[in-house]
């Protein structure tokens, strides 16, 4: 039963992109709205589970419970301000610019440090050409992205920035596109397997 419902829904949604027929388009729109509604319900359940887990840590005062209390407080403050004042309010934007953005910048800085440490650990354990290439490229990208101690308009720094931009815009973008193509092919194959009832993530 569930397999037939999943296959039928998938076929109608897929046909809505290729056949310009009013009944199929209307049914596809209804199914898409139901999927968005179910995704919103799943998000709500995930948030409720998150609050429940951290509230149990706070009530039982387990290890790290102050961080759980801080998470609950930040969540409630953000939710109340978003519902009362809206996302475009000056206070909401102030909190985003002076709390959210610095936290994200700090995480990106930690990511750069972890990348450098991982590269040197990789070279110390596996001394092959690919490891050396990885470390050299990561070093060039970090030096070209970060601030300089000398003049920012010097020939060496300009050349380093150009090399960094070439690596990021050509090689890194090509790798990212390859990954996205792989993700698209994998998602399409997974959807096809669900349509053919080969995979049944919803149960038998």
Image (cartoon, rainbow, N blue to C red):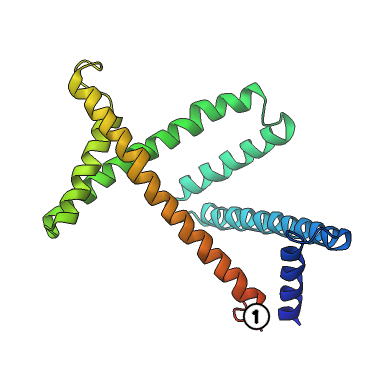
**Residue, far right:** 23
Q: In the figure, is residue 37 to the left or right of 107?
A: right
Q: In the figure, is residue 143 to the left or right of 2?
A: left
Q: Which residue is pictured at 22% across the width and 37% down the height? A: 140
**Label 1: which residue?**
197
Q: Nearer the viewer, residue 18 or 176?
A: 18
Work out which quarter of the rendered image holds the C terminus and state it. bottom right
Pinpoint residue 61: horizontal percent, then vertical percent: 48, 54
Pinpoint residue 23: horizontal percent, then vertical percent: 88, 62
Pinpoint residue 168: horizontal percent, then vertical percent: 34, 39
> To which quarter of the image does residue 163 belong?
top left
> To which quarter of the image does residue 93 belong?
top right
**Neighbours of disc 1 within 10 Å: few (<14), some (14-19), many (20+):** some
* Tally of numbered discs: 1
Q: Nearer the viewer, residue 41 or 48?
A: 41
Q: Secondary structure at mark 1?
A: loop
Work out which quarter of the rendered image holds the N terminus and state it. bottom right
Q: Nearer the viewer, residue 141 or 55?
A: 141
Residue 86 lies, with reference to residue 65, above or below; the image says above
Residue 202 can be seen, yes or no: no
Residue 89 can be seen, yes or no: yes
Pinpoint residue 202: horizontal percent, then vertical percent: 66, 75
> To which quarter of the image does residue 12 belong?
bottom right
Q: Which residue is pictured at 51% across the width and 66% down the height? A: 186
Q: In the figure, is residue 187 to the left or right of 23?
A: left
Q: Which residue is pictured at 39% across the width and 40% down the height? A: 107
Q: Which residue is pictured at 62% across the width and 24% down the height? A: 91
Q: Nearer the viewer, residue 32 or 16?
A: 16
């Amino acid at each position: 039963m569930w397999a037939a419902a999943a296959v039928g829904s998938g076929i109608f949604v897929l046909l809505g992109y290729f056949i310009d027929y009013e009944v199929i388009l209307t049914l596809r729109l209804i199914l898409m709205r139901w999927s968005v509604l179910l995704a919103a319900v799943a998000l709500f359940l995930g948030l409720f589970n998150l609050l429940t887990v951290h509230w149990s840590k706070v009530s039982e005062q387990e290890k790290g419970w102050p961080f759980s209390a801080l998470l609950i407080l930040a969540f409630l403050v953000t939710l109340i301000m978003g519902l009362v004042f809206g996302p475009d309010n000056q206070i909401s934007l102030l909190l985003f610019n002076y709390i959210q953005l610095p936290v994200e910048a700090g995480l990106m800085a930690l990511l750069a440090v972890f990348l450098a440490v991982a590269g040197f650990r990789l070279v110390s354990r596996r001394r092959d050409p690919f490891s050396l290439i990885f470390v050299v490229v990561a070093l060039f990208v970090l030096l070209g992205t970060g601030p300089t101690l000398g003049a920012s308009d010097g020939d060496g720094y300009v050349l380093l920035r150009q090399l960094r931009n070439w690596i990021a815009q050509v090689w890194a973008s090509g790798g990212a596109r390859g990954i996205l193509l792989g993700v698209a092919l994998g998602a399409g194959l997974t959807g096809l397997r669900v349509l053919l009832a080969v995979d049944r993530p919803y149960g038998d």
